[in-house]
Image: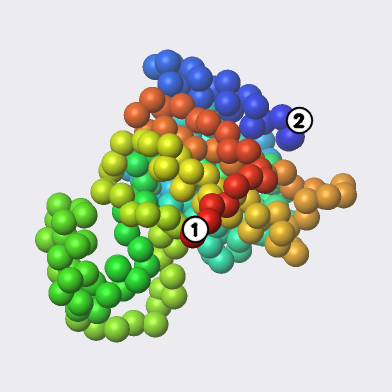
Amino acid sequence: MAKKMTDSYLKNNEQYANGKAVHKPSHPGKQPINPAKHVAVVACMDARIDVEDLLGLQTGDAHIIRNAGGVVSDDVIRCLIISHHLLDTSEIILIHHTRCGMLAFTDDLLKAGLEGDPAAEKLLGQATSRKFTSCKKCASTPSQFHAFRGPLEPLDAARSPKQTERLEWDVRRGMSAIQNHPWIPTSGPDAVTVRGFIYDVDTGKLGEVKYPGPMGSFS
Ligand SMILES: [Zn+2]
């Protein structure tokens, strides 16, 4: 059963995009700790994304791990290892989305702005339409912000082929990080499966990312 859940969630997503709710919001009563559908979802924290609704997840079905970008960071790997080995999930769904804020800055730019570079402050202010106020201090953490690779675009820019390509690169990067981690098995009887998607915040629809696939070039 576990390996087929992603496909049934994709069907739920079609309903959601057509205005039909699948997720039931009321408390379901006492439930076990292990996710009932053996699923773990990694998604961006974007306010326009409601993971339970867009996948038609019910309370108790899945672990949902969210951060800026839905990036497969060290902490997401930590969560997935615990999710699989201790709580019996075996199907991972990775979700990035259109118009993501992680397309609109670079790690160097944000760090420079926070440290007090006036040019970076100005650029970040223009990019976000919010006065960027530098802290004028240096810090060793976070070591990375994990902004997405590729040419910057304005915050909340509409979907374009280039934007889709940049999102796909990062989904593939995340899938690779999961599939190649020595503590996340992807073969044998305890294997985990991973599928990656781009969620369109304008239409409510999920689109699957082919893996493996292109990772871009600086040329
Ligand atoms: Zn996002």
- Which of marks 2 and 1 precedes in the sequence? 2
Residue 104 shows up from this direction: yes
Of badges 1 and 2, the one in the foreground is 1
Residue 51 in sight in this render: no
**Front-most of 216 and 118?**
216
Tag 2 residue: 1
Q: Callout 1: few (<14), some (14-19), or many (20+) C-alpha neighbours within 10 Å?
A: few
At horizontal 63% and vertical 45% (from top left) the residue drawn is 213
Determine crowd level at label 2: few under 14, some 14-19, many 20+ residues with C-alpha closer than 10 A: few
Residue 69, x across and y down, in percent: 43, 52
Residue reaching furthest front? 219
Q: Secondary structure at mark 2?
A: loop
Q: Residue at x 54, y 22 (%)?
A: 12
Task: Identify the disc placed on residue 200.
Answer: none
Which quarter of the image is occupied by the N terminus?
A: top right
Name the spot of residue 171 as percent of width and height, x first.
55, 48
Tell me the amino acid under the disc marked 2.
Answer: Met
Gap between marks 1 and 2 measured at Cα: 45 Å
Residue marked by disc 1:
219
Q: Position of residue 179 (x, y in %)?
A: 70, 54
Q: Residue at x 53, y 56 (%)?
A: 217
Residue at horizontal 46 percent and vertical 27 percent from the top? 205
- For residue 104, above or below residue 11: below
Q: Which SS class for mark 1?
A: loop
Residue 75: percent from the left, percent from the top? 54, 64
- Name the amino acid type tagged 1: Ser
